[in-house]
């Protein structure tokens, strides 16, 4: 809600003349001719006219004064007053200070075109040496950045120079009491094993290829295939067997699923994931299709 401004220009010429004439009997009782032809009345009307002009100027900011105010607000480029006013208002309405989680995320995405996604975790301190280590700390924020994949990489990770640049950029915009950390994402490796019955006509190998491609798109860390913050698999979203079944059954050429199993990587070994694989808040999903190639078959 804007601050209400007082109207300083609320006295008219007639008001001023009447008020001054009403004071004549008090200060000069011998002055009895109040007609417009009287020299004293003429002076009263002249002073009332000058006063009305001054009141009009008091209620308005001169152009030079407005330009000074705009410069104090950070506008130094536009010389025309209308352009300077519009540019200053646009700058004031935009994000600059990082306060909320959304502020950190949007500032990074707006400043760095190479960053596809950004996720901010409040009251969490991530270890730059090992991003998988999260420590709960009040007043800390951890910003996870995901660059656009290069050369078909399935696990895009930010370069050290990009992490340093983002850290310095946010350091100027964070609150004084806030401590921030910038790291790359952690990937949870999963695989799918299934026995699928194909419709008559399509070749099982072709159906198998389409299933694998659909699962890659479904678990993609960057993209518009899922309802994530900026496209791609959402940070910290668990993997459910029912959703994987839906992706496979919606693939062209699939009649039905005989059996399905989820697997997750534990060190170098694959272990069963049950009907749900829990994903950490700072983690995305990486679908390993090499295991799927041997587990998915047509019947």
Image (cartoon, helix red, strand yellow):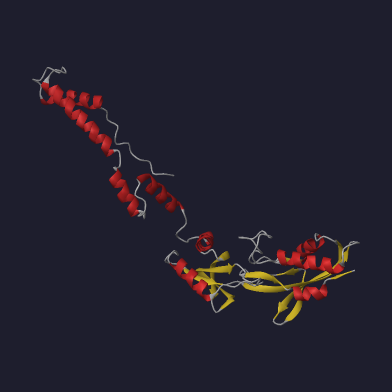
> Does residue 25 appear anywhere in the picture?
no
Q: Look at the image and tell me in which quarter the N terminus lies.
A: top left
Q: Look at the image and tell me in which quarter the C terminus lies.
A: bottom right
Residue 114 position, x and y percent, is 55, 66
The residue drawn where x is 72% and y is 77% is 265
Residue 150 position, x and y percent, is 62, 70
Residue 81 position, x and y percent, is 35, 45
Q: Which residue of the protein is positioned furthest toward the left in this rendering?
A: 30
Left or right for 183, reference 291: left
Left or right for 46, reference 267: left
Left or right for 17, reference 106: left
The quadrant holding residue 120 is: bottom right
Looking at the image, how many numbered discs can be counted on the residues? 0
Vertical placement of 224 versus 25: above or below? below
Task: Give whichever of 255, 138 is nearer the camera.
Answer: 255
> Does residue 122 appear anywhere in the picture?
yes
The quadrant holding residue 53 is: top left
Residue 122 position, x and y percent, is 54, 66
The quadrant holding residue 159 is: bottom right
Q: Which residue of the protein is positioned furthest toward the front in this rendering?
A: 151
Vertical placement of 62 versus 232: above or below? above
């Amino acid at each position: 809600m804007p601050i209400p401004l007082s109207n300083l220009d609320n006295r008219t010429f007639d008001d001023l003349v009447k008020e001054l004439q009403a004071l004549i009997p008090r200060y000069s009782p011998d002055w009895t001719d109040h007609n417009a032809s009287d020299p004293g009345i003429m002076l009263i009307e002249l002073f009332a006219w000058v006063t009305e002009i001054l009141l009009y100027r008091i209620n308005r900011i001169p152009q030079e004064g407005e330009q000074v105010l705009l410069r104090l607000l950070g506008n130094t480029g536009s010389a025309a007053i209308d352009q300077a006013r519009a540019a200053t208002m646009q700058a004031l309405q935009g994000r600059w200070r990082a306060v909320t989680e959304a502020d950190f995320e949007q500032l990074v995405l707006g400043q760095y075109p190479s960053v596809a996604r950004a996720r901010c975790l409040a009251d969490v301190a991530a270890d730059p040496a090992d991003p998988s280590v999260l420590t709960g700390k009040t007043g800390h924020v951890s910003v996870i950045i995901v660059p656009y994949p290069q050369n078909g990489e399935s696990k895009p990770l930010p370069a050290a120079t990009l992490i340093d640049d983002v850290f310095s950029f946010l350091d100027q915009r964070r609150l004084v009491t806030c401590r921030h950390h910038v790291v790359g994402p952690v990937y949870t490796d999963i695989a799918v094993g299934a026995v699928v019955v194909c419709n008559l006509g399509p070749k099982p190998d072709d159906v198998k290829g389409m299933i694998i491609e659909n699962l890659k798109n479904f678990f993609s860390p960057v993209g518009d295939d899922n309802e994530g913050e900026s496209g791609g698999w959402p940070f910290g979203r668990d993997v459910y067997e029912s959703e994987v079944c839906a992706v496979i059954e919606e693939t062209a050429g699939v009649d039905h699923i005989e059996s399905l199993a989820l697997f997750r990587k534990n060190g170098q070994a694959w272990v069963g994931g049950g009907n749900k694989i829990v994903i950490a808040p700072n983690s995305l999903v990486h679908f390993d299709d090499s295991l799927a190639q041997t587990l998915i078959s047509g019947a």
